[in-house]
Image: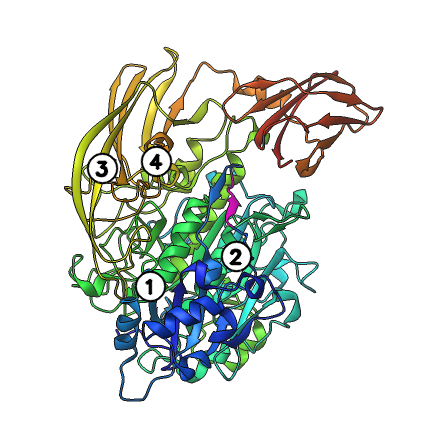
Amino acid sequence: METLCIFKHQIIIAFSPDWIKKSVVDNKEFIHGKLSDFFTEDAISIATGIGLWNNDIADAPTSKIYPFLDSDDTLSLTRSGETINIPKYWATFLVYWPLNDATPIKQVCDSLNKFYPIVEFAHPNYLYHLNSVPNDTFYYTYQQNLQHDPFNPIFMVDAHINIENAWDISVGIPEVKLGIYDYPIFYTHEDFGGGTLATSKIKGGKVYYVNALGVTDPKDISAFNINNTYDNHGTLVAGIAAAIRNNEKGIAGIAGGDFTAGNVGTSLYSFGITGEPFVQVKNPTTPNNALCSDADASAAIVDGANYIKQPNGTYTGYGLDIQNHSWGGDSSSVNVRRAIKGAARNQCVLVCSRGNNNKATDDPNGTDAIIYPATYNDEWVISVGASGSNKQRLNIFDNNVGCPFNWSSMYGKKMDVLAPGSFNYVASTLDGALQATKSGNSCFATNYCFFDGTSAAAPHVAGLASLILSKYRVSNGFYDTLEPEDVENLIEKYAQHHAPGPSFYNGDQGWGLINPDNTLDKIKNNQYNIYHFTNGWPKTETNMGNITITVPIPSIGNPGLFGLPAGSYVVEKWKIEENYTNTFGSSEQILGYWPRLNATNGFKDFSTNFLTDDEYASYSFSQSGSTLSVTATTYAYKNTSTGLWLNYEKNNVKTAYSVHTYDPTKNFIEETKKTNLTLKLYPNPATKKAILELNNNKMETFQLFDINGKQHQVEILINPKSLEINTANLPNGLYICKTALSNGAIAVNKLLINN
């Protein structure tokens, strides 16, 4: 499969930020222009001198890929309240490079990459396809993907994910935000609330509509009438994950809440990165699959993950908790890779479909098994394959009942888990008007149809992630929030494993079929805990002497590293070991532990590993009874010629891991009953002060803790109906408010402070 470009002349180029006019970047009204409009005079002069500039290049039509970012947008707020550095995305542009028809676009990109670090990277504006398959089979049962009906012989025993018991623990809540990256969601569907966007559970998003020139102008979804102009792939994905549950209509979404209790479940955000404007460039070998561009996908990923504070106190970006990506391609884009990595560092759970390939004998280690973004670093994404009627990977040659005979779920290359993807067993939502105009949709009712492929499998996992994040919250009596690797490890560890045991991983089956019941059972109350540990002590820093590293010449898919031009460098190598000893109570059982590389600052051992600037540490775990000993090892490097560290100074190195425990002696029933009151706390994030509404309750005590468990003294002003909290003297970050009331109830609120 060859990934195509939208137009032959489109190239994504990340320039050195020093070359870009910040005043133009900061002008939100100026999105499209000539390349010379974005360059400083000094940069043009230098570019001319080195042969990178002429009149044709100066006049090349150029567009911002990230028009929503300013030049000072360098920090983002993660889901747990930590402030992290983000790449200078704003220096990346989509350029219509002047070239003749005989010049391959990749050759031009290779030439541009030789100007590194002035050109940080250049590659074609790749296209990716949706991971759907033809709807060529119709079976007459409904949601076998979620439950088994023993009284209905048509329902296959092994086709479902055992969801009903999980719903006794968590059904999804609106505070959790899930982005669907796909065709725009048909937001007026009855199973999303119906009527208008304002009445639906789709809370926002954008449509990346491409005009006739191939230029994208992202617009808020409210500016579009999402109807049968668009394909229903995104609507089908959204329905599986979070169609409203218990509303006496249609289907039950996995994280669809409980309508009878006034809860419509996880909030959906629609990022329409593909649509009918791409119809003229659809891949002729897969005519039902529209394409999305590299530039649009990366912009949407960054916008969805970031949460950047502006000078006026507002935030840009959506701060999503979860992203669902049921699309992919075989191009290793530096631009999309950087966006995916940035989203993971922002603590966004990224669920990616593994892809469909009608060859059942693919070599898991072969190049034809690579589909991005599902095969990017394992700690960044959850890669999802499709299962059929027998709990195993859907394969056209394994007698998997209901498997269409023209595709198989891909496998290998770090596939994590399986979820239902057989056409016969997965039902979802779609636009009835489109249903009547499109051929090949086997639908069992108006606005409802069957859906298959790894595109259908991925939202099962996104829905399960929503249930996990909805349950494990401070407001439910848990101490902390979960990070992406916590969610991934819970899903993998408690999946329906294949023989010989629960620690068995198989490249063909991953960790097995997801099991929401078993997974939610392991966080069903605060007898279970997931502890986060960082910055171990004692800390040992060892100077390993000088070594020579070679930064390769940048090429497509192989960016430059650390902002260094290609060449050899002598660097001072430091080995940092952080040692931890975690001793839990005698009754507290250790269920599992795992590294959190997204929260790690440090690098691999460059003398024994391929040179990379991805964060990394190695972890050695040793358990003896209720004591866990951990040694985390990472490296820092200093350029001896400049004295500058490569991204992380040795004193700023950080390691991180999680421990999952269970204490059967903890009285969760008593604590759950006490922590049963929700009080309104605003503004959140707070600047200088916050107001806690007491709802006619009398306050007994108020306590404020940071995320490390340290209690902070704070001035409070008690009013008849509210409590005013003075936050002016507190460091920025995430805090836990515990308010004891005279009726015996305890309210727990999470407060983000940004003074």
Say which residue appears at 53% left-offset and 63% top-offset.
Answer: 271
Mark 1 vs 3, N-terminal side? 1
Among the 4 quarters of the image, the one containing residue 619: top left
Secondary structure under tag 1 reads loop
Q: Which residue is mark 4?
A: 649
Q: Mark 3–mark 4 contact, CB under 8 Å?
A: no
Q: Residues within 10 Å of mark 3 (few under 14, many from 20)?
A: some
Tell me where the magenta segment starts and ends, as one range.
Answer: 74-79
Specify few, some or many for label 4: CA neighbours under 10 Å numbering under 14, 14-19, or 20 or more.
some
Can see residue 125? no
Q: Is residue 77 magenta?
A: yes
The answer for how far apart the CA atoms under marks 3 and 4 are is 11 Å
Q: Which residue is mark 2?
A: 303
| Amino acid type at image mark 3 | Glu
Mark 4 and mark 2: Cα distance apart in space: 29 Å
Residue 320 shown left or right of residue 111 in the figure: right
Q: Which residue is mark 1?
A: 333
The foreground one among 326 and 94 is: 94
- Residue drawn where x is 78% and y is 22% of the image: 717
Q: First in sequence, mark 4 or 2: give its number.
A: 2
Q: Which of disc 1 and disc 2 is earlier in sequence?
A: 2
Q: Is residue 107 above or below residue 625?
A: below
Residues at marks 2 and 1, CA–CA distance in whole angstroms: 18 Å
Determine the residue located farthest toward the bottom in the rendered image. 101
CB under 8 Å between discs 4 and 1: no
